[in-house]
Amino acid sequence: MLLHSRIFTGIALAALVTSLGAAQAPAHLRDAHAGVATAAPAPDSAHIAAALAAANEQLVHGRVREAMRAFHSVAAEQRAAGDYPLEALRRLASLQFGVEKELDAAHTLDELASAAQEFGDPATRLQALFDAAIIYQKLRVNDRMPERVRQISQLLKSPAIDAQLRAEISSRLVRG
């Protein structure tokens, strides 16, 4: 029963991320790298959307491992093409967390934070670093905390961070 509850949680998280992801990604971030030449041909956005939908379908049918592999594959394909794997990494981290693969989720959030830095998305970087820090703290992986807290503190000073996000994270950040 616990496994079914966690699978349901993973599906719910993936559905939430799916519904929020498109609304939260500003147009300038989606189009930021459109004119940049890449080493590999850019994956077709319709192909990526179909691959993400197929991964969600795997979740609907309870095939969690296959869904995680699919999200990971989409992210790898996007990285290889020099594209921003925002949605694939966000969905993968949510799913990993939902099925109690919390350390994997934290690593995926670190990867998302790195990609966000590369693509000039400080809000996503801040949120990913903060979420990863919370997971590392919960898991008592204390050696990962100081660098994340330092980066979070720097990002909170950035004028590029929305005031609402800054206030939300600042209110939850425990300062020593």
Image (spheres, rainbow, N blue to C red):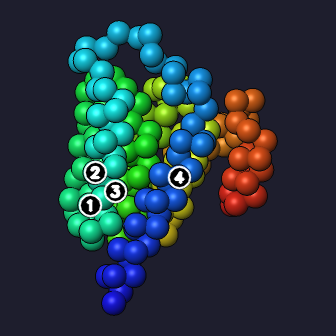
Give the amino acid at mark 1: Gln
Query: What whole-number distance in Å separates the C-alpha atoms at marks 4 and 2?
Result: 15 Å
Visible residue check, residue 50: yes
Q: Which quadrant: the C terminus? A: bottom right
Give the amino acid at mark 3: Asn
Disc on res. 19: 4
Q: Nearer the viewer, residue 65 or 53?
A: 53
- Mark 3–mark 2 CB contact (< 8 Å): yes
Secondary structure under badge 1? helix
**Earlier residue among tags 4 and 2:** 4
Q: Which residue is mark 2?
A: 54
Give the amino acid at mark 2: Ala
Height in image: 40 above or below 44? above
* Spot occupied by residue 23 in the image (x, y as percentages of width and height): 60, 43
Disc on res. 172: none
Disc on res. 58: 1
Visible residue check, residue 133: no
Query: What whole-number distance in Å separates the C-alpha atoms at marks 4 and 3?
Result: 12 Å
Mark 2 Cα within 10 Å, few/some/many (few <14, many 20+)?
some
Residue 61 appears in which quarter of the rendering?
A: bottom left
Residue 14 appears in which quarter of the rendering?
A: bottom left
* Spot occupied by residue 91 in the image (x, y as percentages of width and height): 41, 52
- Mark 3–mark 1 CB contact (< 8 Å): yes
Give the amino acid at mark 4: Ser
Secondary structure under badge 2? helix
Height in image: 75 above or below 93? above
As drawn, the residue found furthest toward the bottom would be 1
Residue 172 appears in which quarter of the rendering?
A: bottom right
Secondary structure under badge 3? helix
Q: Looking at the image, which residue is at 44% across and 39% down?
A: 86
Q: Looking at the image, which residue is at 26% across and 61% down?
A: 58
